[in-house]
Amino acid sequence: MHFVDTHCHLNLEQFQENINQVVERAQVAGVNKIVVPGIDIETSRKAVDLAKKFDSIYAAVGTHPNDVDKFDDNQVKIYEDLLKEQKVVAIGEVGLDYYHHPENAVLQNKVLDIMLSLAANYQKPVILHSRNSLVELMSKVKHWIMQQELLSDHFYGVFHGFEGTATQVKEIESMKMLIGIGGPVTFKNAIDKQILVEEVGLNSLVLETDSPLLSPHPFRGKTNEPFRIPVIAEKIASILQLPIEIVSEITNQNAQSIFRWDEIN
């Protein structure tokens, strides 16, 4: 039984001293594919470097909405070069965050438009971050998708760390996108997230840790790692009253339909 961690920041500084052990612990736990998104140019480059070093790691590149002050137009060419690398499977982590930085909404939207344009030009899916901005982000992404060629059996991306409702999930599904579910679904007080999973089912989901953040219960508050994906999968299996093997199978298929690693030579 294998799992995919579709969102894990192994490119951040705290992982660099023991990265080999982190990847090994993931493999022992059955997590055999890990997507590492960038949050700026530096971490995007690092994600690509990790993807070259480890068979199990794939990279995404992009500027996070909380880091748009680091972005300048000269970086577009750098991102274009990174997108030509074999194991870069997505644009991300990109999006809108009006919780931490409501003051620079205009700049966030400008940078997001550039990132979405890159995704369209290079036919990559998007890994989306939203905080207090989901309605606006969904509208913007829906407009972006309408301008793309229709995809037959692939998804356009994932709303990572999903903060919305089951009704919004149905709209996201109609946009040919999925949602990321991570450690918070295991928290004792996260009844709303557990009900969401019960209502929407497996076909809408991919698994993620968002390491080093959001460790699942009973590891809450500790540095998170991708080896904890099975803990999240077990909780989802319990909520849906399904064998964990089915959770693994369906969420892995969903991840493949977004990131298309089977097409990588």
Image (spheres, rainbow, N blue to C red):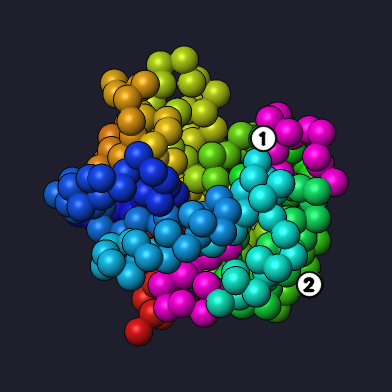
**Foreground: 238 or 256?**
256
Counting every numbered tag in the picture gives 2
Task: Give the x, y percent position of residue 256.
Answer: 42, 66
Q: Residue at x 68, y 62 (%)?
A: 115
* Disc 2 element: loop
The residue that mark 2 highlights is 147
Residue type (three-letter) at the residue carrying disc 1: Arg
Q: Residue at x 40, y 51 (%)?
A: 11
In the visual, does 110 lie left or right of 31?
right
The C terminus sits in image quarter: bottom left
Q: Residue furthest bottom?
A: 265
Mark 2 or 1, which is nearer the eye?
Answer: 1
* Disc 1 element: strand
Instruction: Specify the segment rendered in magenta.
Output: 82-106
The residue that mark 1 highlights is 131
**Foreground: 43 or 152?**
43
Task: Give the x, y percent position of residue 244.
Answer: 26, 43
